[in-house]
Amino acid sequence: MLDSERNTLFPLILKYKDFSRDVKDVVHRRDEYKCQLCFQTKPMVTHHINYNKQDSHSMNLITLCRQCHERTYIHKNDWLQLFSERMRARFGREYEFYLKDIRIRAKYPGRYKGHYKNGPVKIIKPAK
């Protein structure tokens, strides 16, 4: 059973680190098997919103058709802003927690412990 299937408040939020077929299927299902730009049901791909292939959290993934996905290869900052605004409008507070988590991980690389949904953020102090 996936973590998202046990979570009743946010049923389609995943915490996977790998970009597996299961992750893609959950994102496509969450997006109702429609491209989130043209809203057509053509063959779908899963796009990383922040263009970081290592960040395969479901809040960083969005469903696009192949044609729209090709459009995202140029003007990346514009697409990042558009998709972030759409995710913020759609998921609200949960998306804000995800963004806060990313900022904290960047500020304290290697010293971060916990997950944004498990209460307050804990920073591991380096040993003296």
Image: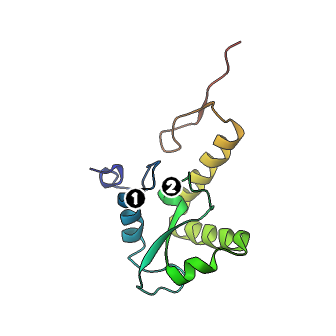
Q: Are marks 2 and 1 in contact (CB under 8 Å)?
A: yes
Q: Residue furthest left?
A: 1
Side of 31 relative to 8 (left or right): right
Q: Rate crowding at label 1 as few (under 14), some (14 to 19) or many (20 or more) other CA atoms within 10 Å.
A: many
Q: Residue furthest top?
A: 128
Please tell me whether mark 1 sits on a helix, a strand or a loop.
Answer: helix
Task: Note whether 43 is above or below 8 in the view shown.
Answer: below
Considering the image in quadrants, where does the C terminus appear?
top right
Q: Rate crowding at label 2 as few (under 14), some (14 to 19) or many (20 or more) other CA atoms within 10 Å.
A: many
Q: Is residue 122 visible?
A: yes
- Amino acid type indicated by mark 2: Ser
Indicate the position of residue 24 as horizontal and vertical percent values. Answer: 41, 64
Q: Earlier in the sequence, mark 2 or mark 1?
A: 1
Side of 122 relative to 20 (left or right): right
Q: Is residue 11 visible?
A: no
**What residue is rendered at 43% in x and 73% in y?**
31
- Amino acid type indicated by mark 1: Val
Q: Which residue is mark 2?
A: 56
Say the numbered circle drawn on residue 23: 1
Cα gap from disc 2 to disc 1, whole angstroms: 8 Å
Q: Colour scheme used in the picture?
A: rainbow
Indicate the position of residue 122 as horizontal and vertical percent values. Answer: 59, 31
**What residue is rendered at 63% in x and 32% in y?**
110
Indicate the position of residue 78 as horizontal and vertical percent values. Answer: 71, 73
**What residue is rendered at 63% in x and 61% in y?**
50
- Say which quarter of the image contains residue 109: top right
What is the number of callouts on the image?
Answer: 2
Indicate the position of residue 119 as horizontal and vertical percent values. Answer: 51, 38
- Say which quarter of the image contains residue 74: bottom right
Please tell me whether mark 2 sits on a helix, a strand or a loop.
Answer: loop
Compare residues 8 and 4 and report the one nearer the observer. Answer: 4
- Say which quarter of the image contains residue 8: bottom left
